[in-house]
Amino acid sequence: MIRDLGDIYMVEGKKKRIVILGAGVTGLSAGIRYLDNGCDVTILEKADHAGGLARTVVRGDYRLDIGPHHLFSQNEAILQEMIDLFEKDELISFSRDAKIYFHDRFLDYPLTAKNVIFNMGLKHALFTSISVVWTSLLKLFTKKRREANFKEWATTNFGSYLYGIFFKPYTEQFWGVSCEELSLDCIPQTSKMSFAKTLKLIFLKKFEKESLSVAERETSLTLYYPIKGIGAIVEKLEKSFLSKGGKIKLSCDVSELITNKDGSFNIHFQYERETVVDDVNLVLSTIPISSLAQILRPLASPEIIQRANSLEYLSTIVLYIVIHERDVLDCAYLYMMDRPYNRISNTNRFHHKLCPEGENMLALELTCHFNDKTWNSSDEELFEKCIDYLESDNFISRNEVKQYLTVRIKNAYPFYRLNYKNNLTEIFKYFKNIPNLSLAGRIGAFKYMDIDQCLEDTSELVERHKKEGTI
Ligand SMILES: Cc1cc2nc3c(=O)[nH]c(=O)nc-3n(C[C@H](O)[C@H](O)[C@H](O)COP(=O)(O)OP(=O)(O)OC[C@H]3O[C@@H](n4cnc5c(N)ncnc54)[C@H](O)[C@@H]3O)c2cc1C
């Protein structure tokens, strides 16, 4: 049965009709902002729940974040906006607490020059220093040009020694491809800054105080964590969105987004076993770009579709290992190299109520590609893949494991392959020519963003629409 909602909305009035694809942080926060500006907003979400990447999966007495998260922002207004969503006792604060595990040593995260010199061990410190000095000398005699790939960037800024022992193993393990195949954008801007600046400052014999201050700035932001897991933020956003009159249609399958000559859209979707056709004035997409290209009518050219399909996302599996309450690591996050997992988190450092009293969980993050061997491994196979390393690193022993659980996330990270930017630029050019269609969010805009940046972007987007008179 086909239900045509178009007429109803047209009669209902002058309110701008907005459809948002995807009910993650971006979709929900944009929805709230459009509602605050008097629009009529519906979110269409493919999954049977809202929340996207910032969700906490509840399994019995265990609260499992989709990858351990915390809230933070350099933007005070956005930070306050996040804090204001919670009651005082629902949010705890702590300072950054992360380390890198490097050949049985615990180094600061982000890596600082001081740490390389004093904590990596004499051999590594010496070779790193020689290699950085050599690289700096070479740079004096070579013409400056932008590094072409991640390997070039890392070797140019840190020397080939540190690249070989640190950057290469960590990065290749994380992304699953060689550093030559990766764009520089695969490292978040903040890490680039702190790594490069702290090391360069000290090797170029500037003051250590100055180098520390860069690292300190990185680590000085207060982190917040909702005591019921990161998913509480999307629950708050969802509640606020619904209370303002927004509508969310879960388990919704959008088949066609037809662009009309007058700049409006007809959107076709399956919802509760019905095919629904809706007329809307404006569409915001936070879903994978290839999914958007598939539903858009008229269809984009084969070239654009091919470019859209070439944009990949890295997937993640989080293996939660439940043990008796014990502070296994003296930090919240531990970054790992040469292991099947890239990062271990100690969930009791986030909040002890994420699991029953007397227990703690280690969250091991394994990046992979959708449908690859790791993705298709059973929970038991994943556990077996990791437990021997945890034992040999003396973190836990097999017989103290009470149980293990996994959460799998298909589109977790935009995959910045070398040629991604060309493809993205062409795709953006194409979408820009479609009036009243916007792309936003970590997945929708193919941008490595945190929650605060999603909120910042939706704030700017809605302000822009207001100024342009689109809403
Ligand atoms: C492991 C990990 C750790 C992180 N840690 C932090 C952290 O500590 N702090 C922080 O601030 N940020 C962190 N982030 C980033 C943060 O989770 C994201 O920035 C944010 O959740 C992205 O929200 P979004 O709405 O843009 O995208 P998403 O959450 O991906 O939302 C997109 C939504 O679209 C839906 N969808 C997909 N396809 C369709 C379709 N065809 N039709 C309809 N709906 C569809 C999806 O189901 C999803 O709900 C982390 C991310 C990961 C993966």
Image (spheres, helix red, strand yellow):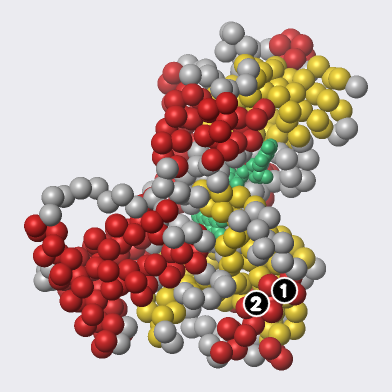
Q: Quadrant of the N terminus?
A: top right
Q: Position of residue 166 (x, y in %)?
A: 37, 72
Q: Position of residue 296 (x, y in %)?
A: 63, 24
Q: Residue at the spot x=26%, y=88% of the render?
A: 122
> Left or right: where does residue 150 sit relative to residue 89?
left
Amino acid residing under circle 1: Glu
Q: Is residue 435 above or below residue 122?
A: above
Q: Residues within 10 Å of mark 2 (few under 14, many from 20)?
A: some
Q: Which residue is mark 1?
A: 381
Q: Are marks 1 and 2 in contact (CB under 8 Å)?
A: yes
Q: Judging from the image, what secondary structure is the residue with disc 1 in?
A: helix
Q: Residue at the spot x=66%, y=49% of the render?
A: 51
Say if residue 10 shows up in the picture. Answer: yes
Q: Residue at the spot x=59%, y=84% of the render?
A: 390
Q: Position of residue 407 (x, y in %)?
A: 69, 62
- Number of numbered discs: 2
- Spot the residue most to the right: 1
Q: Which residue is mark 2?
A: 385
Say if residue 353 shows up in the picture. Answer: no
